[in-house]
């Protein structure tokens, strides 16, 4: 018996339906987390995280705002902005805003290369 997760479309029995009738299957080649990293980054000071994966990974990046909420890469307000840039060896993290010098938590999820 094979093990995994499957989710079928409404009206289809997940135990017997074809793949075309599934919404998700863990048998499919989907993104898998290769690295999960929690960093402290100073507002106004660019930070480089060296992942050394040898390929440009897909990255989900979040930072904890001044109000304590987690916000995604590309987040901008009148007071703060959070952006990353990625290459085959590192990730450059920039948080710019009014609170220069204060630390913010940054969470990175680097995905495994899909072949």
Image (spheres, helix red, strand yellow):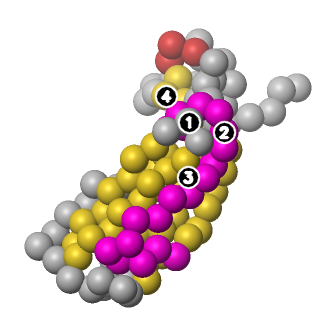
- Which is in the foreground here, disc 2 or disc 4? 2
The answer to the question of whether label 2 and label 1 lie on touching residues, with beta carbons closer than 8 A, is yes
Residue 113: in sight, yes or no?
Answer: yes
Q: Which mark is residue 53?
A: 2
Whole-angstrom CA distance, mark 2 to mark 1, is 6 Å
Mark 1 to mark 3: distance in Å?
15 Å
| Range of residues picked out in magenta | 40-58
Name, please, the residue furthest toward the left. Answer: 78
| Residue 26 in the image: above or below residue 94 | above
Q: Is residue 51 magenta?
A: yes
From the image, state whether disc 1 or disc 3 is nearer to you.
1
Which residue matches tag 4? Answer: 23
Q: Position of residue 98 (x, y in %)?
A: 20, 83
Categorize mark 4 by other alpha carbons within 10 Å: few (<14), some (14-19), many (20+): few
**Comes first in the chain, label 3 or label 2:** 2
Q: CA distance from mark 1 to mark 4?
A: 32 Å
């Amino acid at each position: 018996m094979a093990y995994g997760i499957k989710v079928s479309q409404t009206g289809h029995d997940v135990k017997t339906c074809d793949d075309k009738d599934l919404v998700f299957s863990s048998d499919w080649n989907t993104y898998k987390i290769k690295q999960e990293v929690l960093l402290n980054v100073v507002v106004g000071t660019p930070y480089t995280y060296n992942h050394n994966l040898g390929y440009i990974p897909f990255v989900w990046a979040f930072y904890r705002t001044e109000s304590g909420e987690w916000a995604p890469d590309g987040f901008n307000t009148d007071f703060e902005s959070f952006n990353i840039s990625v290459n085959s060896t590192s990730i450059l993290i920039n948080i710019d805003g009014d609170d220069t010098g204060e630390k913010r938590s940054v969470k990175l999820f680097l995905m495994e290369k899909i072949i």
